[in-house]
Image: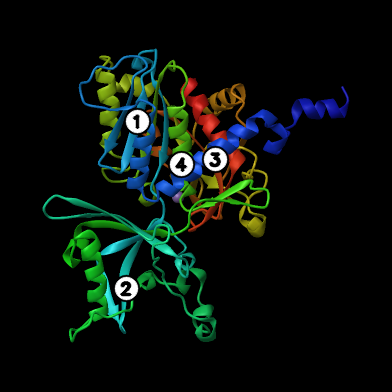
Amino acid sequence: MEAKEWKEKLLTNKKNGYDLMPAEEREAMDRYCQGYKAFLDAGKTERECVQEGIRLAEEKGFRPYVRGMELKSGDKVYLDNRGKMLMLAVIGQKSLAEGAQITAAHIDSPRLDLKPSPLYEESEMAYLKTHYYGGIRKYQWVTIPLELRGIVALKDGKTVKVAIGEGDEPKLVINDLLPHLGREQSKKTLAEGIGGEQLNLLVGTEPLAGEEKDRVKLAVMKLLYEKYGFTEDDFISAELEAVPATNASDIGLDRSMIGAYGHDDRVCGYAALKALLDLDEVPGKTSVCVLADKEEIGSVGVSGMLTAAFDTFMEDLCDSQNVPVRVCLEKSFCLSADVTAAFDPNFGDVYEKRNASFLNYGVGLCKYTGSGGKGGASDASAELVAYARRIFDENGVIWQMAELGKVDAGGGGTVACYMANRNIDTLDAGVPVLAMHAPFEVVAKLDCYMTYKGMMAVYKN
Ligand code: MN
Ligand code: MN
């Protein structure tokens, strides 16, 4: 054989996804991405993602799961865990004793939560204090329009839904210092330039007529009371999140990318959900999709991936077939669907180019995540990675191997280790993202669509 043939036979040949994707898939990709953008605009908090997920699922015939209900092959059910985590299943042809095909993504994203006592007035300007949620770069959240979304739980048991800043509504903002007076601030590091206690949302300046103290604060509280019926004390039992007031949009003159808030990890969450909803026949094994909360702060709590709510859901499904849940889990496969860092030539020195993921090279498979020598990674087995390679290739999924940055540059984790701890064979895969955790993140449409196809391949195998 000539060297050229040896090369083709022996060496890796990475190709841009646009050189691999059949032309007829183009339309399906664009249609898929339209749906994804609509999902992002409807779901800017984990609660809203659950609501939108349920709406889409019910359109496709999914019913709320009720403990003890009879389940037969082809049945489609969902369980809403406290409004912040959604689990869905399509009962397969085979017994759960043969395991389930699971996808697990998260629908919480970094943001600014209001503090329990947020409202104050200073120099006749009213502000709301925030406590950031997840790993944000604080300097990125100033001087951008923000909106407030969430709920206020009242003492009488009622819940008020709050959405301020949609469409033509007024926005909120956190101000930064002008460069003219920023000499000292500019000497600080990026991490220190804006402090956590400076992330205060400007919410008003017009005082209420009268002689009282803090009349601007009072005027703001009056507006909130008139619109939503809650008082200052009710902030204590509220979950209000300041999120970027920007909708998803195409990026690039060629429209090849999507820019939005919350790609991490709604881009995988939507792929996992949509593939389940689009199953055109009853899968062999039962397909399960988990959209978890709290990943950005450690997957803890009743709605995070560590919650027993997942085990209970699986146990309930297994009970309906008289299968011990431990038998099901040890035979199950889980694709932990979470984003990875796309190579960014503007910051090339933190990536290791031979193992980095690239835009338009498809869904990124990660054998391990973690930091400081795979710390915190579940490190999938070689056999499991081989299985994923096979099912992706067999199903026309364009994929790439992905490692998040240089060995000593940093790192990050996903829900994979929590699924693997349950004795479920688990592998990470997800969409490469530019500017992850920023108020406006960028992904490639081709990678989004291939992640959807990858999830479909998981359910069908
Ligand atoms: Mn994530
Ligand atoms: Mn994240």
Q: Which residue is mark 1?
A: 58
| Marks 3/4: CA–CA distance | 31 Å
Q: Secondary structure at mark 1?
A: helix
- Whether disc 1's CB lies below 8 Å from ligand 1 is answered no
Left or right of residue 401: residue 109: left
| Marks 1/2: CA–CA distance | 40 Å
- Whether disc 3's CB lies below 8 Å from ligand 1 is answered no
Asked if one can make out residue 36 in the rendered structure from this viewpoint, the answer is yes
Residue visible at 22% across and 62% down in the picture:
235
**Could you tell which of marks 2 and 4 lies nearer the N-terminus?**
2
Q: Which residue is mark 2?
A: 127
| Marks 2/3: CA–CA distance | 37 Å
Q: Nearer the viewer, residue 86 or 421?
A: 86
* Disc 2 residue type (three-letter): Tyr
Asked if one can make out residue 366 in the rendered structure from this viewpoint, the answer is no
Left or right of residue 12: residue 304: left
Which quadrant of the structure image shows residue 240? bottom left
**Could you tell which of marks 4 and 1 lies nearer the N-terminus?**
1
* Disc 1 residue type (three-letter): Glu
For disc 3, the neighbor class at 10 Å (few under 14, some 14 to 19, many from 20) is many
Q: Which is in the foreground here, disc 1 or disc 2?
A: 1
Q: Residue furthest left?
A: 156
Measured as percent of width and height from the top left, residue 452 is found at 52, 33
Q: Which residue is mark 3?
A: 33
Q: Secondary structure at mark 3?
A: helix
Which quadrant of the structure image shows residue 170? bottom left
Q: Which is in the foreground here, disc 2 or disc 3?
A: 3
For the residues labelled 3 and 1, say whether their Cβ atoms are less than 8 Å apart: no
Q: Secondary structure at mark 2?
A: strand
Q: Secondary structure at mark 4?
A: loop
Vertical position of residue 91 compared to residue 247: above or below: above
